[in-house]
Image (spheres, rainbow, N blue to C red):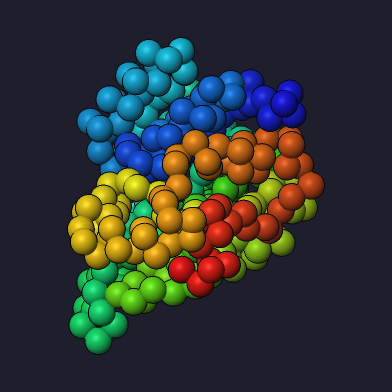
Amino acid sequence: MSSMDLTGKIAVVTGASSGLGAHFAQVLGRAGAQVCLIARSTDKLKTVTEELAAQGISADCYAGDVTDRSALEAAFADIANTHGGTDILVNNAGIARTAPYLDMDEADWSAVLDTDLAGVWRCGQIAARQMVQRDSGGSIINIASILGQVVQPTQTNYAAAKAGVLHMTKAMARELGRHNIRVNAIAPGYFQTEINADFFASDAGAKMINKLFPRRLGALHELNGPLLLLASDAGSFMTGTTLTVDGGATLAGI
Ligand code: NAD
């Protein structure tokens, strides 16, 4: 377990004000990292940092929209000034805008691609430039989705963005390897969070859970091991990989 210890590491999580991101912050913090949270609004983030502080986790928050390069550059510069730099980046921020392919409009297409795909490219580049400048190496973890591997109706934008993240993870890993920066992805199956709570509360959502293999949603703690493996020295020979964490849903063809 000591190789999963993150004491002394600076871990940045985007989209950390809710769901998977808030959970990842807690897991990284419990493993000893100083956690830096980025989200569009720092109001919600403050609540998350207070909850983390109550558990003895050192966390601070920064405003940053992953579609806004200058805001992100300012956030990463603040992190570098306060903590020295970034060792671990979890590219977690993401949105979904569902609509049948024939009805989807340009705004829904662009918003999802700009947040879920370009946001990962943008944040990863800013963090990686800092890592290269410090010659510190690092670990970048891109949160994709099984919908980057298999498809469901009404998600052409999301599926395209997440498939892009999986392939871009390999491309980033290929270029950043010589700087000792590892880049990997996690492709979660279905976990209940704000992004899908309305759907899973609906009849269609309940039917879908019933059809899923293994007939349940994932629990957030089931992402802890994969996250810590990729973030820490335990995964020191892993780069360009995707860990699918879906209880077998893709095997069964969701
Ligand atoms: P969520 O809606 O609870 O969290 C998404 C977070 O991203 C929110 O905090 C939101 O404010 C933030 N965000 C959105 N747009 C942003 C922007 N432009 N700049 C900065 N932050 C922004 O949803 P979640 O389920 O926790 O999703 C987290 C990630 O996990 C997403 O990338 C999502 O695609 C992925 N994912 C989730 C599931 C699931 O079942 N919940 C499955 C597969 C993948």
What residue is shown at x 69% (from left), y 48% (from top)? 182
Task: Give left or right: position of 190 versus 100.
Answer: right
What residue is shown at x 43% (from left), y 56% (from top)? 215
When asked about the image quadrant of residue 71, the answer is top left
Q: How many marks?
A: 0
What residue is shown at x 74% (from left), y 45% (from top)? 180
Is residue 187 shown to the viewer in this render? no
Q: What quarter of the picture does the N terminus occupy?
A: top right
Estimate the x, y position of residue 240 in percent, counting from the top left: 68, 58
Is residue 11 shown to the viewer in this render? yes
Task: Give left or right: position of 119 versus 130.
Answer: left
Estimate the x, y position of residue 199 in percent, counting from the top left: 24, 58
Q: Name the one closer to the observer, 228 or 16.
A: 228
Estimate the x, y position of residue 188 in percent, counting from the top left: 49, 54
Q: Name the one closer to the observer, 232 or 177.
A: 232
Q: Name the one closer to the observer, 196 or 54.
A: 196
Residue 84 vs 113, above or below: the answer is above
Estimate the x, y position of residue 145 in percent, counting from the top left: 47, 60
Q: Residue furthest bottom?
A: 102
Task: Give left or right: position of 230 versus 37.
Answer: right
Residue 21 vs 149, above or below: the answer is above
What residue is shown at x 69% (from left), y 47% (from top)? 181
